[in-house]
Image (cartoon, rainbow, N blue to C red):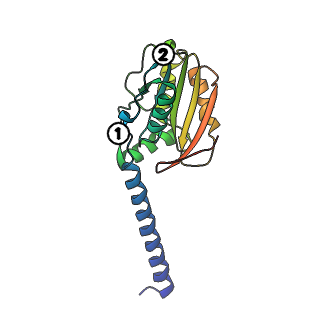
């Protein structure tokens, strides 16, 4: 028979594991319920000189992209991954790409990027670095973007200038602006 202290410790850690699992399930449920309604942004696409590019697994970056496009009239382009990114399983699959800093396969990007005076890239941060689909987009768009600024979306209170520097290197330019936004289950706070 196990000593009482061992059993108490085992029950404590079992309870802790249950609490962590419950918390994670609650967070995932809130994330998956977040919705962006494009019809609420009627002025998107009225300014042909500005393009907002975004990748958004949960919709947080998409909302920021649509808000900016609504304010400026910019056209929108969504980076679409050919890998699974949706739901809880997508979270783990994306984390695999992020940990290794791999590019994630994406669909075709616009051929005419150089026609835009300004391109804004809304990019999530995965595992403290640039999201893999955005890394792939920047690599493919290298030398074709004249001027770029960035909006970074993440869970922590950091600025992530490392991601901005990486995008600069990949795009072969120096960004003109950087906004860093902390988002926790749909609540936004500008960090920089």
Instruction: Using the image as rendered, state which of residue 76 and residue 45 is in the foreground.
Output: 45
**Disc 2 and disc 1 in contact, CB within 8 angstroms:** no
The residue sitting at 46% across, 51% down in the picture is 185
Provide residue 59's location: percent of width, then percent of height: 42, 41
Badge 2: residue crowd in 10 Å (few <14, some 14–19, many ≥20): some
The residue sitting at 64% across, 25% down in the picture is 176
**Image quarter in which the C terminus is found:** top right
Residue 103 visible in the displayed image: no
Q: How many marks?
A: 2
Q: Secondary structure at mark 2?
A: helix
Above or below 9: residue 145: above
**Image quarter in which the N terminus is found:** bottom left
Provide residue 81's location: percent of width, then percent of height: 38, 32
Instruction: Using the image as rendered, state which of residue 83 and residue 41 is in the foreground.
Output: 41
Provide residue 28's location: percent of width, then percent of height: 40, 54
Observer-side mark, 2 or 1, equals 2
The residue sitting at 44% across, 85% down in the picture is 2
- Residue 92 image label: none
- Residue 113 image label: 2
> CA gap, disc 2 to disc 1?
26 Å
Q: Which residue is mark 1?
A: 84
Between discs 2 and 1, the one toward the N terminus: 1
Q: Quadrant of residue 30?
A: bottom left
Q: Quadrant of residue 19?
A: bottom left
Badge 1: residue crowd in 10 Å (few <14, some 14–19, many ≥20): few
The residue sitting at 62% across, 39% down in the picture is 160
Residue 122 relative to residue 44: left or right: right
Q: Secondary structure at mark 1?
A: loop
Above or below 157: residue 37: above
Provide residue 116's location: percent of width, then percent of height: 51, 15
Above or below 25: residue 182: above
């Amino acid at each position: 028979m196990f000593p009482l202290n061992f059993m108490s410790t085992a029950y404590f850690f079992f309870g802790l594991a249950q609490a962590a699992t419950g918390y994670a399930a609650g967070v995932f449920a809130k994330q998956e319920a977040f919705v962006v309604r494009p019809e609420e942004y009627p002025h998107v696409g009225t300014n042909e000189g500005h393009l907002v590019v975004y990748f958004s697994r949960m919709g947080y970056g998409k909302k920021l992209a649509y808000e900016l496009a609504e304010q400026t009239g910019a056209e929108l382009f969504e980076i679409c991954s050919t890998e699974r990114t949706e739901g809880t399983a997508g979270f783990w699959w994306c984390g695999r790409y992020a940990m290794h800093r791999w590019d994630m396969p994406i669909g075709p990007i616009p051929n005419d990027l150089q026609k835009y005076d300004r391109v804004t890239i809304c990019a999530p941060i995965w595992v403290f670095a640039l999201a893999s689909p955005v890394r792939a987009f920047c690599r493919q768009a290298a030398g074709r973007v004249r001027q770029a600024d960035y909006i970074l979306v993440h869970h922590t209170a950091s600025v992530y200038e490392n991601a901005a520097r990486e995008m600069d290197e990949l795009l072969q330019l120096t960004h003109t602006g950087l906004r860093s936004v902390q988002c926790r289950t749909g609540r936004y706070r500008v960090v920089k």
